[in-house]
Image (cartoon, helix red, strand yellow):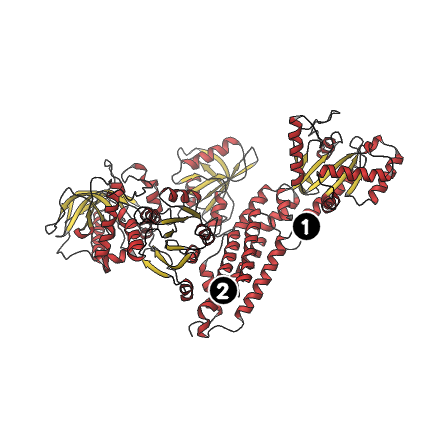
Amino acid sequence: MARVAALRFCRIPEHLLRETVRRTDLSRKLSGVAVTRSSTTIDSGNLYQAALCTQLKKPLVIQQLPSVALRPTEVRVDIHCCGVNFADLLICRGLYQERPPIPFTPGMEFAGCVLEVGPNVTGIQKGDRVIGVSSIGAMAEQCVVDQEMLWPIGEEIPYEVAATLPVSYGTTILALQQRAKTQPGETVLVTAAAGAAGLAAVDVASHVLKAKVIAAAGSDDKCELAVQKGAIASINYTAKSIKEEVKKLTANKGVNVVLDAVGGDVFKEAFSSLAFEGRIVVVGFAGGNIQTVPANLLLLKNVTAMGVNWGRYRHQDFPVFSRSIMSAIQYCQEGRTKPHVGAVFKLQQCNFRASFVRMHCSDSQERSTIFAMSSGQGRCGVAVIRVSGPTSRDTLICLTGQRPLPPARTAVLRPLLDPRSGERLDVGLVLWFPGPCSFTGEDCCEFHVHGGAAVVSGVLQALGYLPGLRPAQAGEFTKRAFQNGKLDLTEVEGLGDLIHAETEAQRRQALRQMTGELGHLYHSWSKRLTQCLAHAEAYIDFSEDDNIEEGVLDKVDSDVHALQSEIERHLHDSRRGERLRGGVHVTIVGAPNAGKSSLMNSICQKPTAIVSPIAGTTRDIVEMALNIGGYPVLLSDTAGLRETSDIVEQEGVRRARERLQQADIVVVVVDTAELPSDLTGMVQFLQDYLKEVMHTSDEYQAEISSASANWIVVCNKTDVVSMDKLEKLQLVLEDSGLPRMCQLSCKTGSGFDNFLHLLGEQVEKMCGNPLAGSPSLTQARHRMHLQNCSHALTQYHQQREMDLVLATEQLRMALRQLGKITGKIGAEEILDVIFRDFCIGK
């Protein structure tokens, strides 16, 4: 952290200062870098500022601490910059393997200038520029460390760059040089490539070791950053398979070295991407799960798996540890590496209280309190204002004049007061929802106030002035409900659909999804697939120990086949759920002046489209959203289909044909007056007319037959033809092999009810009954993941006899696709099934 001019901060009690000094001293002893001394001296006149962790999982605070006397081999450093890495965040959350006593100052790597040296210090003197490593204590204006934990740096390295070198570059150099023995020209895959260690690995591998680097990261922006640092290619592993992309990039050879700092499925995919005799180095996992590698996977390609815990070298092999830092300094001074500084936060600036560093040292679940009007905008009788977050309780008490909380989930009438002036804003109902029994899973409260604009504005402004509150972003209440496990992704999407539902059928479908029916279906599939995967992996790992029942793999094959059949049936639903959610697209097409716009206006019951006797009046698509029989319909009127030299009309015709291809239902309008008088001529005319509309080849009859289920032919203008012609036309309608046909007159309205009945039947058939049978697919996202899941299960069957290990990976890929639909999947679920269903290790 860069230093600036000091600001005045409140002092903390003397007993807390002494306790901090005592525990920091204890931490130095535990780290193995301290020597014995008789006492700890506090100079109360010499204070320095530090970021202090006074409670785990809570934001850091800025406090003044007293300087301590030096031991003989210790050095006091005036810290200019402190590097912030993932371990610093974990240690403040109590998730690091070393847990210093509270209170403590975090910070493990720093750069600065020597202020004072102990009497036995050699090789370092006051004024030297140095970088250093400490167990804790570096996120401050000064730090005391043993001399062996300091390394000199030249003037050419800025302090903020130097502070990034020890942990990230030290780890990378140990991993790629010391452990993996990476050679020039080899291909190196780096996961989490946009993280501190990842960017350092890309930098060192590319510019020092002269290797070819493939960067894998979790977003396109991160991938782009890694490429800027020297990677020759990148993989966004949230959108693509690492294994498949590596195959493409290496011509199926695989990579020579993997440096992984992610774990989980990313580790497994990276491991599968290794070439013959490749090496994978696992770094990090200070607070996560260390990966396990079955021996049979190592034997497939004769690969080597190794780990690098950089901090352990400090105690087990200090010369190697020290050389890694000296190499990092050397490469930087020579200009061979260019460390990336993501951001700089100033320790003493006023807004440190809201800075990234301070807040991210707290528990990731700690959130600000949000508020918003949840009853919609506009004047109304009652407006509902919702508040959610850790200070909801205090907010409710504050706005109700320090009155006690009402009973949970009970509406109570209370005056609402402006917390600044005490002025009464309104009298309304208040409700208290203590977490986790609330919509978001957090403490929540609601204010039901009169819906006038002035009242709502006054209450919202009052909430905005309270400390710790901020206006909610769009969808943030629902997002918190998902993050707190109150809703899965399908239920979240169902809630969104319910809010936007405009028809009765849409409401029924959305409510069914919001109550969890679709999520339960996908969860049941995930559970069955998890069991298949667990049994297959157990067979791979433990079958030689005779601890696995016979017939396990046969049952896995049978269950996978049955599950895939269910998924395929679910996918082949003619997009009923998606059509119901987004609306059935009905497109009106035909020749100019056939009466398309008149029919559009009759259906909409208002003059939506311009009608005139001039052919080609409609040039563009005219759309209208309708509710037909409780189902949503998006009706489109189009330009007349004909050959024309008018450039504008040509574009209209092109758009009409494009919309025709996209339509769910096509209404073809024919001018009855243009029909021949004989039956044979009528049939031939209509066939030729449909051929022109469809723009097909001479073999159009098969295409008409395949499309006829979704077509309605409307013979318009029946008011201007003779009864004899109408009777002949009726015969054509009854027995012609053409799509369903009806007669009507847009001018008189004759036959219009029959047309609406036909159209409504077709719309209902396409959407189905949203309450019948299994819940339908409603999102294109669901369809994509289910198709990927089914494809992976197909790959399982194909690879089953050739390589069970690779086939099992396909089950894992399928399970991941199901998990992406609901947002829930984890490796622990697989392990739970293994140890529940098998007696392993008897």
Q: Which mark is residue 769?
A: 1
| Residue at the disc numbered 2 | 803
Left or right of 502 in this view: 324: left
Q: Give the residue furthest to the right.
A: 724
Which mark is nearer the camera, 2 or 1?
2
Number of marks in the image? 2
- Kind of residue at badge 1: Asn
Marks 2 and 1, the one that precedes in the sequence:
1
**Residue located at (56% from left, 68% from top):** 555
**Which class describes the residues within 10 Å of circle 1: few (<14), some (14-19), or many (20+)?**
some
Quadrant containing the N terminus is: top left
User: Residue 823, percent across and down?
Assistant: 50, 52
Mark yes or no: residue 99 visible.
no
User: Residue 393, percent across and down?
Assistant: 42, 45
- Residue 368: image quadrant is top left
Depth check: 315 or 268 in front? 268
**Real-space Cα separation, disc 2 to disc 1, in angstroms:** 44 Å
